[in-house]
Image (tube, grey):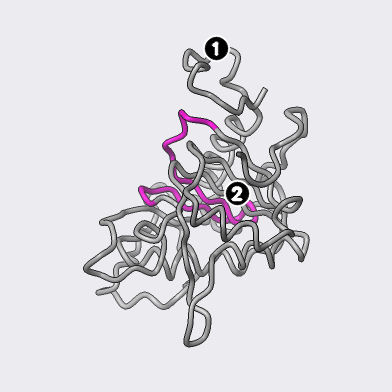
Amino acid sequence: MMFGKKKTSSKKETKKPRGKSSPRSRPSSRPAVSSATPSAGTPRNAPASEFLYISNEAHYDQVIERIKTVKKNLWIGTADIKDLYVKDGRGTKPLLEVLSDLAKRGVEIRLIHAKEPGPAFRQDFDKYPALIEGMERVLCPRVHFKIIVFDLKAAYVGSANLTGAGLGMKGENTRNFEAGILSTNHDFVKSAAEQFDRVWMGAHCKECKRKEFCGDPIG
């Protein structure tokens, strides 16, 4: 059984980051790269420098915490999905609750994933009816990229799936070793958004040679 709302149209024009809505940072021939490793002391949800290198548990502070700040658009591309919890005061809550709150505020949420999530994720999903209409999703078994686009102004591209061991709050000695880049660079964000959008719009479907593995065709 599928979860959420399947993308219903492949003809909707997607807004690209350009003009006044594009990131303010200007590309340079030698862009600065800063580190977001815990040893570098990067503060939680620090402004994305033109290129910010993120490793291991810094994914939680720099990527998951940033999701909470989205105002208009949140695009998530992941190969794997599992139940993922975030900090909530002294306790925790599902990331799905955060996404539900965004959907209630009118944020456009798009999710591309490679396979259906496990039962724990589905059980949590059923608790948030706002996501049924408020989050569109596409299933594509060829997706292996991990891309998150924030308001078409910043983007994360890296190795971490939407799982507790990848992007979540698991500890230093239990989580996956991950690496990625978070950036507000215009060309970087545009490239990430366009790759995501081509899959979202089904641009590869006509020539795809793996349709027999696709149980939920986009086109």
Depth order, front residue of 148/22:
148
In the rendered image, the vertical position of residue 55 relative to residue 148, given as above or below: below
The type of residue carrying mark 2 is Trp
**What residue is shown at x 63% (from left), y 62% (from top)?**
99
Q: Position of residue 12 (x, y in %)?
A: 77, 33
The residue that label 2 is drawn on is: 75
Q: Position of residue 33 (x, y in %)?
A: 35, 58
**What residue is shown at x 29% (from left), y 71% (from top)?**
171
Which residue is outermost to the left?
173
- Residue 151 within the magenta-colored segment of the rendering: yes
In the rendered image, the vertical position of residue 126 relative to residue 188, given as above or below: below
Query: Is 108 placed left or right of 122 in the picture?
Result: right
Q: How many marks?
A: 2
Query: Considering the image in quadrants, where does the N terminus appear?
Result: top right
Q: Position of residue 170 (x, y in %)?
A: 34, 68
- Element class at badge 1: loop
Badge 2: how crowded within 10 Å, few (<14), some, or many (20+)? many
Query: Is 160 placed left or right of 193 in the picture?
Result: left
The type of residue carrying mark 1 is Glu
Depth order, front residue of 145/166:
166
Of labels 1 and 2, earlier in sequence is 2
Which stretch did the figure color magenta?
Answer: 140-160
Query: Considering the image in quadrants, where does the C terminus appear?
Result: top right
- Where residue 207 is drawn, which disc sits there? 1
Q: Position of residue 139 (x, y in %)?
A: 57, 35
- Residue 95 within the magenta-colored segment of the rendering: no
Q: How far apart, in angstroms, are the residues tagged by discs 1 and 2?
A: 24 Å
**What residue is shown at x 29% (from left), y 67% (from top)?**
37
Badge 1: how crowded within 10 Å, few (<14), some, or many (20+)? few
In the rendered image, the vertical position of residue 213 relative to residue 152, given as above or below: above
- Element class at badge 2: strand
